[in-house]
Image: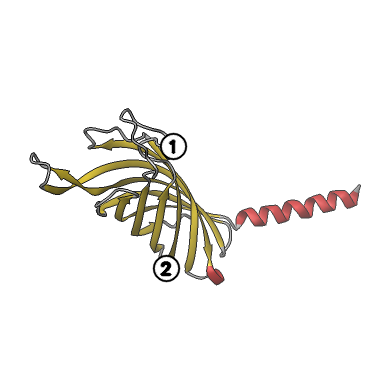
Amino acid sequence: MKKIALIAFVLCIGLAKSQAQVKVNPGLRGGINFSTLTNIDDNRAKTDFYVGGLVNIKFNKYFSLQPEVTYSRQGDEGREYLGNGYSYRYINYELNYLTLGAVAKFNIGGKGFHILGGPSLDFKISDNYINTKPENFDLAIVGGVGYSLPNGLTFEARIKQGLVDIYGYDGIDYDDNDYYYNDVILNQVFQIGISYTFKVK
């Protein structure tokens, strides 16, 4: 009985120490979006921004988990044809999302350089589409690299790939005019930004 109690005590001490090593730091993040939509002829990338908050949960010097809430302005630059049907101009097509995500960060050698990856659930909060109605949500995969300084400042570059066709097509369905959609239209974003985590005692 004494041995069992001693083992339980040692395990509790080890668990307490491991929990004591976990550091939780809130922060802010923001940067530039270079966004586009796949499989659309003659469109161009749109430059906009993202901004949000984060909580960095650092388990040890090699690994941390970072839940994030972000306002992300996406979409693309597409052609708007004028009255004669031949002339056109490029305009911004807006797809703006509130994104809920979490990325796992792996610090190379326990130092400042890290790779990251994780999922993102995006809820559309506004758009400026007139003749079509994009889907109200997207599911995306995020991957990237970054470097963190000891003062809490982090520089990152990410790629965000949407997985849900913004018009709800699946590559098989036909529209009312029997037009075959053989390419789904997905969000695709390249992000460059910074974040800052606050020191919490």
In the rendered image, is residue 24 in sight?
Answer: no
Q: Secondary structure at mark 2?
A: loop
Q: Secondary structure at mark 1?
A: loop
Residue identified by numbered label 2: 149
Q: Quadrant of residue 22?
A: bottom right
Nearest to the observer: residue 195 or residue 122: 122
- x 32%, y 46%: residue: 72
Vertical arrangement, residue 125 with respect to residue 187, above or below: above
Nearest to the observer: residue 125 or residue 15: 125
Mark 1 and mark 2: span between their CA atoms? 48 Å
Which mark is drawn over residue 96?
Answer: none
Q: Residue furthest front?
A: 178
Nearest to N terminus: mark 1 or mark 2: 2
Left or right: where does residue 153 sit relative to residue 34? right
Nearest to the observer: residue 142 or residue 171: 171
- x 74%, y 51%: residue: 12
Vertical arrangement, residue 168 with respect to residue 143, above or below: above
Tell me the amino acid under the disc marked 2. Answer: Leu
Q: Residue 134, position in %: x, y?
A: 32, 35
Residue identified by numbered label 1: 172
Are the two marked residues, 1 and 2, in contact with CB atoms closer than 8 angstroms? no
Q: Quadrant of residue 185?
A: top left
Colour setup of the view: secondary structure
Tell me the amino acid under the disc marked 1. Answer: Ile
Q: Residue 180, position in %: x, y?
A: 37, 37
Q: Residue 58, position in %: x, y?
A: 54, 57
